[in-house]
Amino acid sequence: MVNILVTGGAGFIGSHLCDSLIASDHKVVAVDNLSLGRESNLQQLAGNPAFEFAIGDVLDTDWLESLLARGQFDVVFHMAANSDIARSHGDPSVDLNNTFTTTFAVLEAMRKHRIGQLVFASTSAIYGEVAGPVREGFGPLKPISHYGAAKLASEAFISSYAANYEIQSWVTRFPNVVGPRATHGAVYDFVHKLRRSPNRLEVLGDGTQEKPYLSVFDLIAAILLVWRTTTDPVNVYNVGASTRSKVSDIARIVVEEGPTPAEIAYTGGDRGWIGDVPKFEYDISAIKSLGWSPTITSDEAIRLAARAIWAESE
């Protein structure tokens, strides 16, 4: 049994990660400030003696260090971040604080308490707007969102802490992730727009934006495989679907899975917001070499997510 801390543990991805870690017979403490996470995402783990949930903010360094001092953790899975890219365009400090400074705070606490393993949730947004398929060694990296910049800065500090303080690290760069318990993203937004206006779905952009969408269950399997099987001081892997979906396909699928037909109206332009990368494609040959592949296509992941989110929104 490994003693694990999960930051952002009540969030979309973090809560699914907690489920898998508990199912693998680890001991887990999940922490979340509930700014994006939901306590209900962890209700299935309530009462499990191997699981604990603590409400708190990792930016409160005294609170975080107190938690680490009593926890005797072997590894930290750092999932906490601002995951709403569009939000920080109007307020860049959102990503400075919630995406980068959270990472620095976690690294510092780990250094002080001699915790030797970090698993970090990074993103395709670090690459910026580039022609794919993009491999892990691509550069120079020029993110176009504050979120991508904050994740890239986080990766840089993770690398320096690995070299200076022997904190072995696993960095997985996520694509767009979909599934039950989502709190944002195109599928989530479309479902909730249709709940408010059942006959018309407004879609930002022209619908041609095209990216890989990965099931959260495939993502969790990839994260855990990388952590369990790779042994470098810093291990970096792209994780993504083998196929891509257009925004127009997402809109169509969400409408098909909903209760009534709806008109789809596009606002125009090649992207949804400033900082949005309209087209992206990963090279995932590195993680495939470890034996992982997505179990479903991008469109299939979107359809299953749409069904779940429609059900959750009732």
Image (spheres, rainbow, N blue to C red):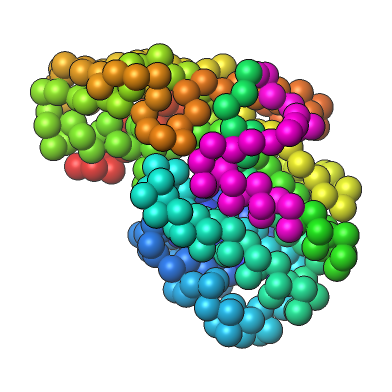
> Height in image: 70 above or below 95?
below
Q: Residue at x 88, y 60 (%)?
A: 163
Q: Residue at x 75, y 29 (%)?
A: 138
Residue 105 placement: quadrant: bottom right
269 sits left or right of 135 in the view: left
Residue 144 shown in magenta: yes
Residue 56 shown in magenta: no
114 sits left or right of 143 in the view: right
**Image quarter hosting the N terminus:** bottom right
Give x and y (percent) for residue 271. Answer: 40, 24
Give x and y (percent) for residue 235. Answer: 80, 45
Residue 238 placement: quadrant: top right
Residue 285 can be seen, yes or no? yes
Residues rendered magenta in the picture: 132-157
Q: Residue at x 81, y 59 (%)?
A: 160
Residue 12 can be seen, yes or no? no
286 sits left or right of 120 in the view: right
Q: Nearer the viewer, residue 65 or 287?
A: 65
Give x and y (percent) for residue 191. Answer: 26, 33
> Height in image: 89 above or below 278?
below
Give x and y (percent) for residue 51. Answer: 55, 68
> Height in image: 144 above or below 84?
above
